[in-house]
Image (cartoon, coloured by chain):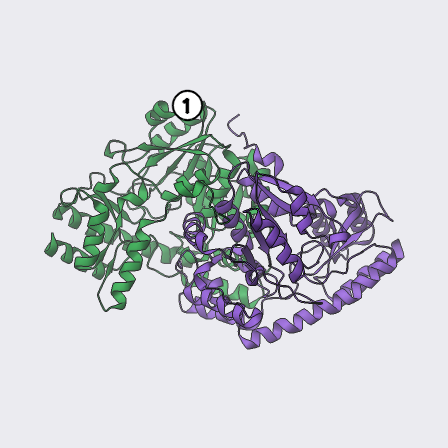
Chain colours: A purple, B green
Amino acid sequence: MNDRIARRMEDIKPFQVMALLARARELEAQGRSIVHMEIGEPDFITPQPIVEAGIAALRAGRIHYTPAVGLPALREAIANWYSKDAGITVPPERIIVTPGASGALLLAMAALLNPGEAVLMADPGYPCNRYFARLLEGKIIGIPVTEASAYQLSSSHIDSYWTPETRAALVASPANPTGTLLSQTSLAALIESVESRMGTLIVDEIYHGLVYEGRAATALGLSEHALVINSFSKYFGMTGWRLGWLVVPKNFIGAAEKLAQNLFLAASTPAQYAALAAFKLETLKVLETRRVEFQRRRDFLLPGLRSLGFHVPVTPQGAFYIYADCSQFSADSFAFARELLEEIGVAVTPGVDFGCNASRQHLRFAYTTSMEQLQEGLKRLQAYL
Amino acid sequence: MNDRIARRMEDIKPFQVMALLARARELEAQGRSIVHMEIGEPDFITPQPIVEAGIAALRAGRIHYTPAVGLPALREAIANWYSKDAGITVPPERIIVTPGASGALLLAMAALLNPGEAVLMADPGYPCNRYFARLLEGKIIGIPVTEASAYQLSSSHIDSYWTPETRAALVASPANPTGTLLSQTSLAALIESVESRMGTLIVDEIYHGLVYEGRAATALGLSEHALVINSFSKYFGMTGWRLGWLVVPKNFIGAAEKLAQNLFLAASTPAQYAALAAFKLETLKVLETRRVEFQRRRDFLLPGLRSLGFHVPVTPQGAFYIYADCSQFSADSFAFARELLEEIGVAVTPGVDFGCNASRQHLRFAYTTSMEQLQEGLKRLQAYL
């Protein structure tokens, strides 16, 4: 009776893939070879210039709290990056450095959402988005998206699903788990649709930079009202450092700072000093090599999966995921994922981790492992299916 | 209209001291000498063995995500620490590694509190505690505490303030801003009082280790239902690394893991590897030297402030704060803090940052600066007052 748990916890689900990952580690400990295509982080380590900057910061005793919204030099470096990379001006004051994109999401939702207010988001989508809204007693409207909109929300979804209680819509481009992009035109139409209803568009841009076809437009070039989430994790290869950022409209700066002070105190100091090296030319060169390698992997894995009978109707243009319809092989992708792991040592993420829209028909393949491993994975799948 | 901010933000206050700190930096930039007694983190840098372990981890490429609840080796190291330091057994499964104690507080409140449910806490107290509860639409009952209970909640407070909507009480020992301890007897009485009402006691133990008189009892030796928050920040000198932990009752392990996955993904990987060196004998030796230095500072500053006319009725036994009644000098400690900064370059934290109970009569002095600076601060105060 003392240990009763808050009601929200009934709605907040664990990552199903963690059980599979644990089982995979168990099998590996028994000597089985496992091809890991379930892991949502780059297999590369942090580029050396960033690591060296982190080490130099530690040697220099940079271990005290930074300002809650981040090191001024880092906020400026991010602003410069927007200027160089996208040709847009973002005042550093609007950039809040956070403990990972997770921190940015919490901050965005906390500043926006009243209890009972709804956020529209695509199903399938990154699962944590839902739970941040739930944490704050908001409502989550998961909109089933299909290949027709490249698994993205469109302005017609906004038209159909917006109600007086809707406060915001959240999109991601490139998206997890589908790897699809929102074109500049689609993004502009979404912004128009959301903002004309006096709503806010939250845009998850954490896979920016990891794009293999076309270009990921940033919402910052299209709206001064959008909240934009980004991260040093994926493109910059700093997952475990836990560092991200949030760009807020001018009117939110005060709220964002109060939240950062009270919820985080500040993001990691060594990580922030390390990240100052993320925009250096030598780092960017390393990152471009890696981007090309991810593209090579996608260009190998995608046709390979398709030829085996996995249905991937929209070519993923970014991130490092392929969201594949596996209904030719199984009516229950969760059971199928477990079967693939046990039978042939191939680890993938079941669709249930991303929502409930046809999720039993889908698996997510992450190409966050070497070409050799991807080849081995395809070989095993081919032999088994 | 697009940029409307959630209602909770009206109740979430910024740290007032930040404006003073900014002004202090401004004055310093103009060449003024400032004695900093407003800063809530040790002036020492992280002990060298921890820094070296962090650097070694970075060199070894330890930058990927750890399990959401933390590195198994770190959870075991913390469990061993409880065994060695306090002679109590805490299964590593109950220890959740978090991004700072801030992460631990969020996790604890999220797992416990339904909207509308109340948490009892002492006023004055650490301000963020209130805002974590507010974030989750909980109610905060700030109980005015006085010297009579050493500024701590007592079981009679629980008797008086507990209502059917109360879910939990939160205490801190040593406390911020008062530096006072809860004796083992008082803590046991609080636990009895809270748990007999089917409530949960949350105990903030982040200043454990920084104790100069008596001994800080851990709630873990007294209850299996308490939620205990701790941190590598203060005693272990790792503030900017952002690493803490939460010990949960058995029944909360699943909820805590789900929350850690969804809200944080995991705590900082380099910080976790670094912290593995926190319990090494050579680190503990450094920490003991620092504890002695803090005690020396307290033993200098406390009588100094008292002799100037600051009223400190309860001797602070731990942390690095003195909460002083300044009503002999001013009826408005916020204005007084500003005056001290402008007139004599002494920076302190106004009471308003810690609640509304006689907060205009109090200032917090942090002895997180050198003896020389403390001497200079007292000299300036003496000359001015």
Quadrant position of residue A320: bottom right
Q: Amino acid at mark 1?
A: Thr
Q: Residues within 10 Å of mark 1 (few under 14, many from 20)?
A: few
User: With B341 as the anchor, is B273 left or right in this view?
Assistant: right
- Which of B267/A282 is in front? A282
Quadrant position of residue A313: bottom right
User: With B109 as the anchor, is B71 left or right in this view?
Assistant: right
User: With B180 as the anchor, is A8 left or right in this view?
Assistant: right
Q: Residue under label 1, please give it.
A: B163
Figure check: A84 above or below B157: below
Figure check: B163 above or below B67: above
Quadrant position of residue A6: top right
Residue sticking out furthest to the front: A196
Figure check: B233 above or below B166: below
Point 51% across, 39% down: residue = B110
Tag 1 secondary structure: loop
Point 43% across, 43% down: residue = B9
Measured as percent of width and height from the top left, residue A383 is found at 89, 57
- Which of A222/B170 is in front? A222
Q: Chain of mark 1?
A: B
Measured as percent of width and height from the top left, residue B119 is found at 42, 32
* Total numbered circles: 1
**Does any portion of residue A346 appear in the rendered image?**
yes
